[in-house]
Image (cartoon, rainbow, N blue to C red):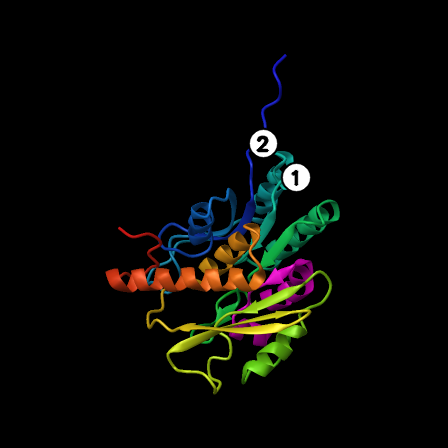
Amino acid sequence: MTEPLKTLPVDVISIQSQVVYGCVGNSVAVPTLQKMGLNVVPVPTVMFSNTPHYPTLYGGALSDDWFSGYLQGLHDRGVTEQAKAILVGYMGGPSQAGILAEWLTRLIAVRPDIQVIIDPVIGDYDTGIYVNPLMTAAYLDRLLPLARGMTPNCFELELLTGRQITDINSVIAAARTLLTGRTQWVVVTSAAPGSSGGSENELRVIMVTRQKEQVFSHPRIAIYPKGTGDLFSAALTGYLLKNQTLPAAIEGSYGDVMATLERTRRYGYGELLLHDR
């Protein structure tokens, strides 16, 4: 009698958008995590031809039946027994968020050690809200209480907390209101962009934990391809799984983003270039 075949080793289950062309969502998270030597299973929430800033767009959200089936399939195959982290990004709508929240709740009940990292993708200052407007409440009510850590940008932090962000101290105060339940840390990207005390040529990332806060600054590279937040959250997840401290993981992640932006600018592309040609 032959022994049963083993389940493939999986480090990260990445649940977010996917595009045919471009580098956002799983289309950037998967190669980023694989480059770090981690095995990743991508679960798409939407499948688009490209991001919506192009003149044409095709595709849409996965049906609730398909989405819930994909998650159930991971349980059926034994993947959820061994995955070390769940990375959550762009969601297709509030109903998906509800399905995912129920799945995560069941998983956390048997795997309280699993890292759940959520990038609450809602929008940004230059684009406004680009998801279903009900997703802000869905994140707050259903998903964020299940997160060990989260990576909102400053615009998203304002929406999630209902607070106006004017400077570093207001970023920290707003982020602290999200440190409830399981949540141990909030890392805010593009933090306090209009505040004084910094240079127009730099951006900030602000880490807030239950014990402390820390401000990181990095150069501003004046190109604006989509997907930098997805790259950051994927790299951060990877560095944490490599047993880096949170501050070291943040430094490594924005270092990766800066290197990718420099490479993209050098070649003149409109989408992130993840590797040298």
Query: Which residue: 52% across, 54% down?
Result: 239
Is 149 included in the stretch rendered in magenta? yes
What residue occupies the far top of the structure in this picture?
1
Residue hosting label 1: 81
Q: Is residue 73 visible?
A: yes
| Magenta span main SS | helix
* Residues tagged 1 and 2 counted as in contact (Cβ below 8 A): yes
| The disc label shown at residue 10, or none | none
In this view, the residue in front, 129 or 266, is 266
Kindly identify the residue that appears in the image at 35 percent across and 52 percent down. 21
User: To which residue does mark 2 refer?
Assistant: 7
Q: Furthest-bottom residue in view? A: 196
- Looking at the rendered structure, the secondary structure element under dot 1 is helix
Look at the image and give the residue range highlighted in magenta.
133-159
N-terminal-most mark, 1 or 2: 2
Q: Nearer the viewer, residue 240 or 141?
A: 240
Kind of residue at disc 1: Glu
